[in-house]
Amino acid sequence: MRTMIGTAGLLLVVQGAGGLINNLFTDSRSWFLLNHVDMPAGLRMAAHLVLLVVGLVLVARTGTGRDPA
């Protein structure tokens, strides 16, 4: 279970951080999930930040040595 949560957290970190960088420095749609959802740019940036934070929390919880479930 811990491995699956850690993997999901890593995926969220990649999607959040990559999408945030993509939106800050370029304007391509690329492969980041939220770039393909129809929403205002400011909301999209906030959503990428939320994905990043949630992913970091999940990754941090799986590395503490206790089972987060």
Image (tube, helix red, strand yellow):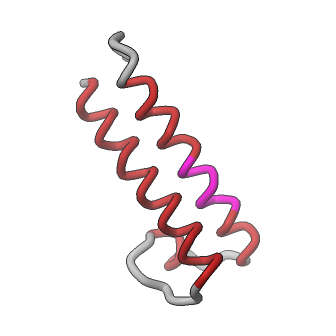
Residue at the image point whose x is 35% and y is 10% from the top: 66
Is residue 19 left or right of 49 when viewed as pictured? Answer: left
Please give the name of the residue rendered at 42% of the width and 83% of the height, measured from the top-left corner. Answer: 30
Counting from the top left corner in percent of width and height, residue 42 is at 76, 71
Tally of numbered tags: 0
Q: x and y percent of residue 52 in the render?
A: 54, 50
Q: Measured along the vertical axis of the image, is residue 53 above or below residue 16?
A: above
Relative to 28, 40 lies left or right: right
- In front here: 39 or 68? 68
- Res 69 quadrant in image: top left
Residue at the front extreme of this rendering: 25
Quadrant of res 49: bottom right
Using the rendered view, name the quadrant where residue 25 is placed: bottom right
Q: Is residue 29 left or right of residue 40?
A: left
Q: Position of residue 28 (x, y in %)?
A: 51, 89
Q: Is residue 6 magenta?
A: no
Q: Is residue 27 above or below residue 14?
A: below
Q: Residue at x 58, y 89 (%)?
A: 27
Pick the quarter of the image with the N terminus: top left
Range covered by the magenta-colored residues: 46-52
Magenta stretch: helix, strand or loop mostly: helix
The outermost residue toward the top is 66
